[in-house]
Amino acid sequence: MSNDRATPETKGVTVQLLASLDLGPEIEVMEGRRLRMRMVTIEPGGVFGPIHDHKDRPGTVYILQGRITDHRDGIATDYGPGVGWPEDRNTTHWLENRGAIPAVEISVDIVRQE
């Protein structure tokens, strides 16, 4: 399935916040932003969708367990375990777990304060 077709909604995904840091006191120009680290688990057959971008929310992913298929620009790429992918302003994608075991990733990104 490519990004050109309708992507499924999120299912079989659990997100746990592991840490968060207000960046304003650390770096003056980062006022109103925070660094966060989350553990995301995608069950077999699970989808982290629909298609979404990372404009104004850069990050990076490390896969602890399983494999995650990243769909972007009409290309499906499998990752894991190990270093995953960067998520920059040009990233528009959705994710799925095509495997038989839960896929677990650590996601670190910079977000606006909520």
Image (spheres, rainbow, N blue to C red):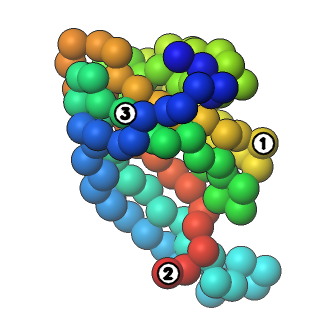
The amino acid beneath tag 2 is Glu
Task: Name the image quarter holding residue 28.
Answer: bottom right
Q: Mark 2 points at which residue?
A: 114
Q: Nearer the viewer, residue 42 or 86?
A: 42
Q: What residue type is labelled 3?
A: Val
Q: Where is residue 59 in the image (x, y as percent from the top left)?
A: 61, 49
Q: Mark 1 points at which residue?
A: 90
Give the quarter of the image for residue 47: top left
Pointer 3 or 1: first along the chain? 3
Q: Which of pointers 3 and 2 lies earlier in the amino acid sequence? A: 3
Residue at 58%, 67% in the rendered image: 111
Residue 30's place in the image compared with 61, above or below, is: below
Q: Position of residue 66 (x, y in %)?
A: 31, 19
Task: Check the image and name the residue furthest to the front.
Answer: 6
Q: Is mark 3 on a helix, strand or loop?
A: strand
Q: Name the residue under label 3.
A: 47
Q: Quick check: 74 left or right of 64?
A: right
Q: Could one spot residue 65 in this view of the protein?
A: no
